[in-house]
Image (cartoon, rainbow, N blue to C red):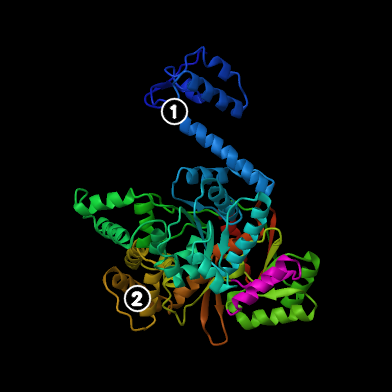
Amino acid sequence: MDYIALYIKNLCFNCNNIISSYRLSHSLPCENDLDDNEILELLNIKDENTFRELLYKKLSEKGKLKDYLNIYNLYKEVNKFSEFFKKALSSNPWRVQIMWFERLYKNNSFSMIAPTGVGKSTFIIVSSIYFSSEYNKKILIILPTRLLVKQFNDLFDKFISSLNPNIKFIAYYGSNKKEIKEKINNEEFNILIISNQFLTKNFDILKGKKFDIAFVDDVDSFFKGSKNIEKLFILIGYSEDDINVAKKVIDIKLRGKLDFNSDLYKKFLQIKNKNSGVIVLSSATGSLRGKRVILYKELANFTIGTGSSKIRNVTDLYYIPKKDIKEELLNLLKELEDGGLIFVPKERGIEYMKEIYNYLISNNVKVGLIYSKTKTREIESILNDFYEGKINFLISITDPYGILTRGINMPERIKYAIFLGIPKIKINIRNLEKNIMNIIILSNLILPYISEIEKDRITKIITRLRKNMKKLSSGDLKLISDFLNGNKVELVGYLKSFANDILTLYNILKIYTDKTEILDKLKENPDVSIEVDENKNIYLNIVDLKTYLQASGRTSRLYSGGISKGLSIVFVDDQKLLKSLDMKLRYYLL
């Protein structure tokens, strides 16, 4: 059967002319650039590099080289970066890392939304050294904790010693504070690595300095500082006036009243075209909200998007304890020997965690304890000992924002995670707290068991809350929470409406959760486990899948041979939640 070519207008990658589908499928330019005889040699070449070089040569010699020059230059730059990357890590970059590099090379702001362990931090480090040494770019790296700043400092030392570029970097993580601040103030660096906290407390030192590229690792925690977004834009070259204009445009746009011919919008377009730096955001979830998030879309021309944690190489096991859990844990650690994280259920509390820690220490287990009250210097010391093998295990509370859940990056050390109970969200329905997320979760759970009229009413409120939640920053949510908990906070506008909707749901829930028939229905729900304590408080438990995936994901990381194999072992403390976790994982990882 003869091949019938399709001709497409304006799709030649070199001259934007009409081109056949046959030529496009063989990566060839149109007939106006190279005729049929001139492409014969190219059709017989199998090696991509040889093909690109010959195509460049033929177009150049014929005087037809146009847009292909940009493609060719990008290809050469990718090869150059790949060699640089290989020299640093003794392995080639992954395709997703090449994609990130291409965007950075084109001076495009973008977000790296990918699960933990896929090489975001590695890319930040290697590309920072590359662009700083090759193009004299000034780089800013913002990390969630000083602990991670210290880890990045050590990695930069390692890579710079092997690559030997002529650059200086500064990492501020607590030592020689005065001297380091003076160096930052005098701009004695090509690359600056700081924590979110440093940005918040020491912005005066940074103000007035312009960075060509700003990386934000773990943007989920970065966004908790309500003013951090504005500060970041100032550090890449925007003024406070520029940001205020952008915010005005966003406010008017959200109300549907923006006049695209107005002087305000024309000024905004001028601001968008400023010669500013590039922002690269890194996130495992992409689940961000609030008006300030829209600044990225309006000023940096990209959206943060949503993420997925489905790239995962973890074997999920469960174990039903047959005797005292401390003894069971000790026996398991003796079998596994080294490289584990131990997560104690949040609802069991700090004292229970310390009890397990002391039991392990008394049995000669080398374990480090890290939790919210552990001082930064002590955390750094414990993690350093773990990294060097002086400590075999780390123990902490199962916390979605805990150090061990998302603030540690040691793929060569962390082999497995042990959960001493299924990670769960626990809601006291007899003494219901005015917790925003818990109220929304519980409202959704009772929907199947109430009248159609009430179901319709609650559904409309939940829909409105979800829509309005997209406008809220973490600062807004804190204000609303303070108001709900009786603090003297004055709310106006949509913040007040949001709080009133939560209170409406709260009052509805108080009525329904007192009804025996509703409680009986909730007991039958396969995703809900009911627990009654000695004080007759009734707790509703549901699986916290997000925290489980985040914490167990510490065991599976990207390396030169692929995604490392991790192991997660869950001690079952609730048979019903085990089934729920199993089903959720099967559905999520399809």
Residue 381 lies within the magenta run: yes
Closest to the observer, 188 or 63? 188
x 60%, y 26%: residue: 50
The residue located at (41%, 56%) in the rendering is 236
For disc 1, the neighbor class at 10 Å (few under 14, some 14 to 19, many from 20) is some
Q: Is residue 433 magenta?
A: no
Tag 2 residue: 503
Judged left or right of residue 127, residue 203 is left
Where residue 463 sits, quadrant-wise, is: bottom left
The type of residue carrying mark 1 is Phe
Gap in angstroms between the C-alphas marked 1 and 2: 58 Å
Local crowd at mark 2 within 10 Å, few (<14), some, or many (≥20)?
some
The image shows residue 485 at horizontal and vertical percentages of: 39, 81
Q: Earlier in the sequence, mark 1 or mark 2?
A: 1
Q: Amino acid at mark 2?
A: Leu
Residue range (magenta): 373-398
